[in-house]
Image (tube, rainbow, N blue to C red):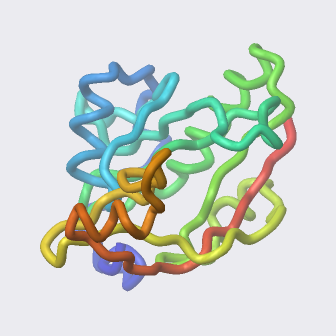
Amino acid sequence: MIKYRMGKADRRIYARNCEIREVSAKDRQRFFSLTHLDGDTRSRIAFGLYFQEELVFCISLRKPVHKKWKDYIEVARMSSVLNTGIPGGLSKLLNRVIRYTENRGHKGILSYADERHGTGSGYTTSGFKVDSRTSNRFWWTDNKHRFDRFKIRASQDLTEEENARLSGVRKIYGCANLVLVRET
């Protein structure tokens, strides 16, 4: 991301030279585990841009976590292959996602932009509107690894803090997310 934003990505592949295909679950998992800071996550479907048979940009979709957005489809993950800029990639994939949502009666597309890494400008340029801002995110750490916030929760007998202490982890905090929405 840093190299791309500085204009120093190792290679540039134009989206117009790529083919859009549905991505298998296995390929999606492998791709995001290598290219996304948070790795892969569950999703319903994924679409990718392929350049000469190489998956170079991928977007995965899922049912939104929050009931408020039940009539929308959520972007679960999106990333490009490392050290590569894909001009037009976001727009091309979003156009495919729009067709997917319209065919299934969704009201629109929902996504989150992590403020640690940007302002969501790619989304707003593609017709998304900022709906709101979440509270700061957090994760758990054992001082070597970072774990999803849902890994440690309160149980019937113990609070979240007690479970964290027993598991040998503590909270670390990040930035908020922008909530972005595009109506279809």
Residue at the farthest top position: 103
For the C terminus, which image quadrant? top right
Residue at the farthest front position: 157
Q: Residue at x 43, y 22 (%)?
A: 21
Q: Residue at x 50, y 48 (%)?
A: 89
Q: Residue at x 54, y 52 (%)?
A: 88
- When asked about the image quadrant of residue 100, the answer is top right
Q: Does residue 32 sit above or below 118 in this rendering?
A: above
Q: Position of residue 54 (x, y in %)?
A: 23, 34
Q: Decide if residue 128 is on the left or right side of residue 28.
A: right
Q: Position of residue 50 (x, y in %)?
A: 34, 33
Q: Nearer the viewer, residue 121 or 53?
A: 121
Q: Decide if residue 141 is on the left or right side of residue 58.
A: left
Residue at the farthest bottom position: 6
For the N terminus, which image quadrant? bottom left
Q: Does residue 7 sit above or below 36 in this rendering?
A: below
Q: Decide if residue 16 is on the left or right side of residue 9.
A: right
Q: Does residue 168 sit above or below 7 in this rendering?
A: above
Q: Decide if residue 101 is on the left or right side of residue 58.
A: right
Q: Residue at x 48, y 30 (%)?
A: 43
Q: Position of residue 139 (x, y in %)?
A: 39, 68
- When asked about the image quadrant of residue 17, the answer is top left
Q: Does residue 4 sit above or below 85 in this rendering?
A: below
Q: Nearer the viewer, residue 53 or 108?
A: 108
